[in-house]
Image (cartoon, rainbow, N blue to C red):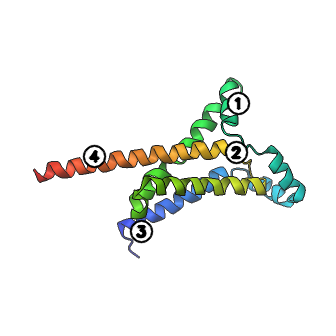
Amino acid sequence: MKFTEKQKRQILFAVYLLFVIKVIIFKYPFAQLRDITNSWSREVVLEGLDSANFTLFKTIHMYIDYSYVLNSFENLVGNIVVFIPFGMFLPYIWKRFYNFADTLLAGFLFSLGIEIFQLYSAFGAFDVDDILLNCVGVIAGYLFYMIFVLLERGSAQKEKK
């Protein structure tokens, strides 16, 4: 079976999305995930609501204030870096996402979906700052995409001359 270049990029993007879900949601060993699912109850959901962060910049400030103790750099930068490919490849693959607002909205909704799943599943903790940092990653990725497009256009114009 032969795939077109666009289909190859779409498959690669789907693999990337699965990787993000694995790294963020299913980051624990299988036995631990099984134990979490066995403990699911109303109380677990309520506990998730109690531990959730709905205050913008709360976690970011905590990581900065306690950077000497916590793995701040990995958490702050990791949340950004993991979403850079999202902002780069979504507009590269689908014309609908050439628009910055559409790409950012898609990244926001994907990140929000992950956080809501974590909130109700206990496979992590809901944190509004994670959504913010993920969106910063989408924005950075989109900027890289735009730089690529501008460089590609400049190269094409040079070839015409």
Taking the spot 77% from the left edge, 57% from the top edge, the residue there is 120
**Which of the marked residues, 4 or 3, is nearer the chain's N terminus?**
3
Taking the spot 62% from the left edge, 56% from the top edge, the residue there is 21
Q: Tell which residue pokes out farthest to the bottom in this image.
A: 1
Q: Nearer the viewer, residue 76 or 23?
A: 76
**Which of the marked residues, 3 or 2, is nearer the chain's N terminus?**
3
Instruction: Identify the residue position indicated by label 1 in the image.
Output: 62
Residue 147: horizontal and vertical position, in percent?
A: 34, 45
Q: Secondary structure at mark 4?
A: helix
Does residue 26 appear in the picture of this structure?
Answer: no
Q: What is the CA distance from the residue labelled 3 to the residue labelled 1?
A: 42 Å
Q: What is the CA distance from the residue labelled 2 to the residue labelled 1?
A: 12 Å
142 over 72 or under it: above or below = below
Label 3 crowd (10 A; few <14 / some 14-19 / many >=20) = few
Taking the spot 80% from the left edge, 59% from the top edge, the residue there is 34
Callouts 3 and 2 close, C-beta under 8 Å:
no
Instruction: Identify the residue position indicated by label 2 in the image.
Output: 127
In the figure, residue 9 lies in which quadrant?
A: bottom left
Instruction: Identify the residue position indicated by label 3 in the image.
Output: 7
**Which of the marked residues, 3 or 1, is nearer the chain's N terminus?**
3
Instruction: Identify the residue position indicated by label 4 in the image.
Output: 151
**Which of the marked residues, 4 or 2, is nearer the chain's N terminus?**
2
Q: Is residue 148 left or right of residue 16?
A: left
Residue 151: horizontal and vertical position, in percent?
A: 27, 46
Residue 82: horizontal and vertical position, in percent?
A: 55, 46
The label nearer to you, 3 versus 1, is 1
